[in-house]
Every structure is written in C-alpha cells, then in structure tokens.
Amino acid sequence: MGLYVEPAQCWIDPSRPAELALITHGHADHARGGHARTIATPATLAIMVLRYQTEAGATPVNYGETLALAGGVSVTFAPAGHVLGSAQILLEYQGERVVVSGDYKRRADPTCAPFAVTACDVFITEATFGLPVFRHPPIEQEIARLLAARAAHPQRCVLVGAYALGKAQRLIAELRRAGYAEPIYLHGALEKMCQLYIEHGIALGPLRPATGASRAELAGQIILAPPGALNDRWARRLPEPITAMASGWMQIRQRARQRNIELPLVISDHADWAELTQTIAEVSPAETWITHGREEGLLRWCELHQRRAQALALLGYEDEDD
Amino acid sequence: MERFAALVDALTYTRSRNAKLELIAAYLRETPDPDRGWALAALTGGLSFPAVKGGTVRGLMMDRVDPVLFALSRDYVGDTAETASLLWPDPVTPPGPVPGVTEAVTSLAAMTRTSAQPELAGLMDRLDANGRYALLKLATGAMRLGISARLAKLAFAQAFAVSVDEVEEYWHGQAPPYAALFAWAAGGGPAPRSDHLPLFRPFMLAQALEDTVVDLDLFAAEWKWDGIRVEIVHVGGETRLYSRSGDDISGSFPEITGALPFDAVLDGELLVRGSHQGGEEGGAASFNALQQRLGRKLVSAKMLAEYPAFVRLYDVLIIAGEDLRALPWHERRERLEQTMALLDAERFDISPVIPAQSIAELTEIRARARDAAIEGVMLKRRDSAYVAGRRTGLWYKWKRDPLLADCVLMYAQRGSGKRSSFYSDFTFGAWDGDPDQGATLLPVGKAYFGFTDEELKWLDSYVRNHTVNRFGPVRETDHSLVLEVAFDAINASKRHKSGLAMRFPRIHRIRTDKPAEEADRIASLLALIVD
Ligand SMILES: [Zn+2]
Ligand SMILES: [Zn+2]
C-alpha cells in the first residue's frame, strides 16, 4: 500500500490512488497513476505522463529543493542513483528526520544522478538484494561479456532483456562508454522511454527499431527488448538470437535457467549486499527500517552490527524493476 | 580451472544438445593433457573424492559466514555449492595462482577427512566465484549438467574427428585422465589396446520395423526375449557381465560369471528360469522375476535358488582372442552354435532361429505364439557384420505388443493427496530424430500411475538427485532415465509439439539398464497412429 505520512496526510509510493502522493521514482511498482496530487522530480513526473498519459495536480520538485507540506512536515528530494529522476525522500517533522530511500544503488550510472548520503534518524531502506550472495560485478565486466558474445557469433544477434525504464538506457549508455558505436536495435516497447532519456540530455547514440528490420540487417547486432518479450513470438523472426538478460537476479543460476537465458548479465539498478550495508553504515541512522525484498538478511546484519532495525511489511512491490 | 569453469558456466545455460557437443568438443581440442581428461571425467560424473562431502562445504562456510546469513542465502539460492561460491570472502593475503584442473583433482584426491576443509579453502581462495562453483561441483561430484556418457563420447569424437564407435570401443578400458585415448585421437598415436582386459564392447542395436518390407531370404528371425540385454566377457581369467549401458552388473549374477571359463565375448538376454516365456521346458520367468535380482549387491543363496539366472545367447563377438565382428551374421551364428557345446546348459542356451520361410509365415507364427511375455521378433540381416549402435537396414525389432514405448523422464511434479510429498507425476519424452545427430527430446505424455509404492519411492529420490532445473512445483531432470511406458493408443495431435497424444499412458517399467539415447523416436511413435 505504500507508506502513510500521518501528520501530512500523504502517501509515499502508494499502490492505490491517493489524495496526495510523493513518488520516489517512475517504476510501475512505485509510481501508479490516478492520484489527485503528485509530488515528484520533474523527470519522474515526465515518466509518469509517458506511462499514464495525464498526471493531474503534479508538483515538480528538484533535488535539494524543500517543500512544506501540511501539518508542519517538510519534504526534500535527494538523488537515489537508481534510474533517471529517482529520489530519496527526506521528511522533517518536529526536529526528526526520516529518509525513505525508495530503490537505490551506489554504483556510477551515466543515466542518473548519484546517490546522496543524507543524515537522518530513521532510514527506510530497500532490500531487493539483501543477502550476502548478491555481489554485482563491475558493469564493465558484464558489458565486455556482452560484446564478446556478439563478436563470437557474427551470424547471430544478441537479444538482451532489459527493463524499459532505466536498465535499457543504462545498458545503452554503458555500451557507448565501452566504445560501441553500432546502431542498437530496440523492441517497440522501449522506444519512447529511450526518447524521453534523450530529451533529458542522456546521449544514447544511434538507435533503430528492431521491428521491420530484416534478418540480414540484424545479424551481428545487439537488440534490446523488455524481459517479457524474450521468449515471445516477436523474437522468432530474429536471426538465431543469443538470449541475454540484464538483471541482478542473473547471479543465481536457477533464475537464469528458468527464463531460458543463455547469457546472464549481472547488471542491476539496485544496491547489492555490499552497497546496502555500506549505505546503512554511512547514513548511520538511529534506526533502520527495512522493506521491499529480503528483509531478514539485512535485519540479521543490523543485529550483528548492533544497529537498531525492523522489517516493514509493505505489500505490492514486485521485483519487476531489478 | 578458468577454462573449465567457463565451460561449466556455458553448459549451465545451454539447452541444445548440439550446442553442448560443440562446447565440450572445443574445450577438449583447446585444453592440454591431462586437464581435459580430468574435466571430461568430471563432466560425466566419473570422479569421486570421498574426503569431500556436502558437510565439508557447509563446515567451511560456518567458519567464515554468519550461520543465519548462510542459511537464508542457501534457502534462497537452492544449492549449497553455488551459495558457498558466492559467499566466499575475498582472501586477506594475496592468493596464489589460479589452480589448474589437474592440480585441483590431485589435491582433492589426496585430501583426508581432517585435511579436506583447510585444503579446500586454500583452493577456494585462489578462484573467482565461477571457479569456486566449478571446484565445489567437481569436488562433490554433482555436476548435474545433463552430460551423459554418450554425449561425452560424441563430443570427444567430434573434437578429434574420429568415429564414435571406436571411441565407445576404446573408452571402456581407460581410466581418467584418459591419456592413451587422447594420445590416439588427438595425437595420432596407436589405438589403446584392450584385448587383454574384460571390457565392454558396444552392442549392435535394432531399429523399429515400422513399414519396411523384409525378405526372409536375406533376414533371419529370432524371438525378442523379455529380459535385459547383456554382454558377458571373459578375458585373462576374469569374467564380467555388462548391461546395455555398459554398467558392470557382474556382482549381482555370480552364477553367470562363474559359468564362462574360456575367453569370449557373448551377446544375449539375461533371464530367470521359469515357465512364463518359452514353455515349461527350458523356459524363462517373467521380467518381474528378473527384477528381483537386478541391482542387488549381495546375493543370498535363497535368491540364487528361487530366481536362478541364465543367458539366452544371440551372438558371439570374440572367441579365443579372435574378433568375429566383421564376419556376416550367419557365420557368427555357426560359431555360436559350435560354442554352445562348451557351455554349461544350465546357465546358457541359444536363442533359436524361427523357422519361417516367408514373412507371411512369420506373421502367423508371431501371432500364434501364446507367450505374452515374448516381446516380439528380431530380424537380422544374414550378411550383416556386428556393428556398434543402431544401423539402418541391418537389424529390426518387430514388437508384438507395440503399445509400449521407451521414453525418457523429463519432468516430475508432486502428486496430490497422500502422494503430495512424492514426485509422482511424470512427463516423459521421445527423441525427435537421432540423438547423436543433435535430436532433442519432445514431451510425448504424462503418467502418474503404473508403478508400485516401492518404485514410487525410488522414482521420487531419483528425481531429487537428478534435478537440473525447477519451475515452481515442477522439476526438470537430467534426462537420463528410461521409462517403459504402456498406453492404449496414440492419436495425432496438432496441439502437441510432438504431433501426437498418448491415450492412457502408465509407467510400465523403469529401465535403468537402458541409456537415454536409445529411447524411442517420435517417428516410431507416429507410426503407431491408427486412423
Ligand atoms: Zn525501482
Ligand atoms: Zn522497487
């Protein structure tokens, strides 16, 4: 259902239409349509407009800007490093500071502003990858594997499953950073979001629609598609695709095999175990609330490090944006 | 180890049999001895290191990771070796060089129960996560990559462009790391000699008759007996009994191995004395009687008395050091008939040739044979040499009761009600072509009865130990087990990828003696469609 901020009578990332919603970022499990009033960063609002057509009563707020809400609550948005426009929400009330991290990561990402450590009394952290088995490798290494697979099979294409918001654009930007200048082909479901990123000043290089391109044109190319389209009818016309997937879950062999992934790329927009624990240590709140993922693991870490913590059972968040 | 870990990784994510073959072949070509030999043995489950147990790995982790975090992680990942490979902390001191496969195997083999933990830790420190995974899988002997012995041999043949029949022939005399085998195939050295050892020689197999018209001037007919196909070998004072897949089953049948006192390699059907097949006189008992004897390590005197085994001989491959396999069938048959006089009649008899002059007559004899247990008729080309595998046009099997098919177990699901703790719903498949040519298995049916409670327990634990993949409540096995499936009819079906639907399928028998590659093909099932 989201978090309810009682004195200000507003919700953070509500899963049902609310009077006033503060939105951390544009992923569907956080940003739903239909709220009467929405406060979010300009990029997040643009993403919501793209996804839900209209967004009535939208109040844009820049990183670092503070807004006064009802009941003496003030709110400040700070970058979360997760996707374009993603924010942590700092709430201040009667001298107490609460930070709702939303989803976040600590790695450099050419498509969004880096996570800002914000001092607070209560830190509400996500825990998508809240087990010590999750250690995301450097992205350069995964990009190199992707490029090596492409080079090894000039007659085939590499079809990479990537979430439409964030993952796809980061993957493209990282490919460009690695010197890859070829056109990158997109499934139709990714085109508008890439366009939105470009309009926000993120350079993505030459992009082409995959639909309509001939098999010969697609041989030896990299094609991006939403994960749901990987084993779809749509993929059948591609030249012998090497099916890849860019996700933190790809670290677990079973997860990759279940999805018939040949080339699992461990690339995530969430913090891995080291980033999660490092962040709690750096923010060093009086209390940590853990939600959204494998709470028990992070809770145990807090216990071992004598940090006060509790798990919040929030429903409605899926692992769909990892 | 890096190259091997990369191979393990690639095989993990590769579904196609052809692609697996290519990956293994490339590895074997590009990797030096003896690494490649050890790797090959590891892939096919041919290595075991008794000092390293599942508990060794867990113990190793308990010293390094909080037990609660380990347990949570293990639950999430679903595999101890994988969990350990991911959780392993970076070493404090700079690690030594990455160990090679040979170094890993050598030190694993030398470990004792007490040294296993520290020594394994030393190796782990020198590897990355993929390397640690490969090492732990190697150490605990549970690769679960779906690489059958046949697939490995095919890959080996493909790697060095040698014939797979020759690989089959020489393989059995060799132990890891197969130095002589690589010297022969990769280095152009002499073929590994095996005449002096009681080794398995690959069987000649029959194909389903379907609608081929056979001329009995060219073909001889024999009954197809309902036991298990065996090869009995005596060389240099030692006797061995091998099943169809080349497994040594000598220990279960001492009365047979004790009854061949001279050098020979014979092919026949292992049966138990009784009156079920072939009448009261010199008859054989049902397959069930034989089953009482299969898989037993210790054979009691009571067992020997109640279920006395014998071999009904079909063929002779080698006698007194003379290899007869290149001779035509009729000449081998003559030699076999001469040999019978030297054999103990209680333990060996000869499978008679059916005296039919024409196919019409044979059809009549076949239909009249009252013996329900006789599986059908074999047709053997009189001029055919004894060649390994299933060759077109040489031997045919003409099953009398065609409503049985050998299928490969693919998936299992838990049952409901009192069977909910058992994997009791089985999906099985048949090959869509020649598995040696890259055919794949397509599901052809699903069965959830036909087995005894004891067989159910066995199947359940088989599934648990051979799982390569999980999809919710469904487990995918490594496609290694042959199930003989009985069914009422086969109908054409557009809804199924195989193009057929089985009516009322049930598990008839568990055929641990058959390799998966020899299960039925889709084409022979399609031939059973009656419209
Ligand atoms: Zn998100
Ligand atoms: Zn999320």
Image: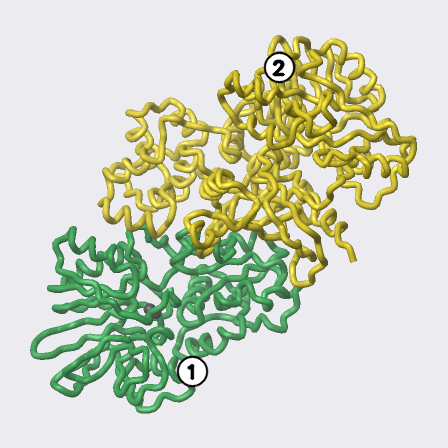
Is A8 displayed left or right of B227 in the figure? Answer: left
Is A118 displayed left or right of B228 in the figure? Answer: left
Q: Hey, which quadrant is residue B213 in on the image?
A: top right
Rendered shade, chain B? yellow
The residue positioned 49% from the left and 23% from the top of the image is B297
> In the rendered image of this protein, does residue A181 appear above or below residue B328?
below
Q: Position of residue A19 (x, y in %)?
A: 26, 88
| Mark 1 crowdedness (10 Å alpha carbons): few <14, some 14-19, many ≥20 | some
Q: Which element carries disc 1, helix, strand or loop?
A: helix
Disc 1 residue type (three-letter): Leu
Q: Which mark is residue A50?
A: 1
Rendered shade, chain A? green
Q: A65 or B323, which is in the foreground?
A: B323
Is residue A31 shown to the viewer in this render? yes
| Mark 2 crowdedness (10 Å alpha carbons): few <14, some 14-19, many ≥20 | some
Q: Position of residue A24 (x, y in %)?
A: 29, 75
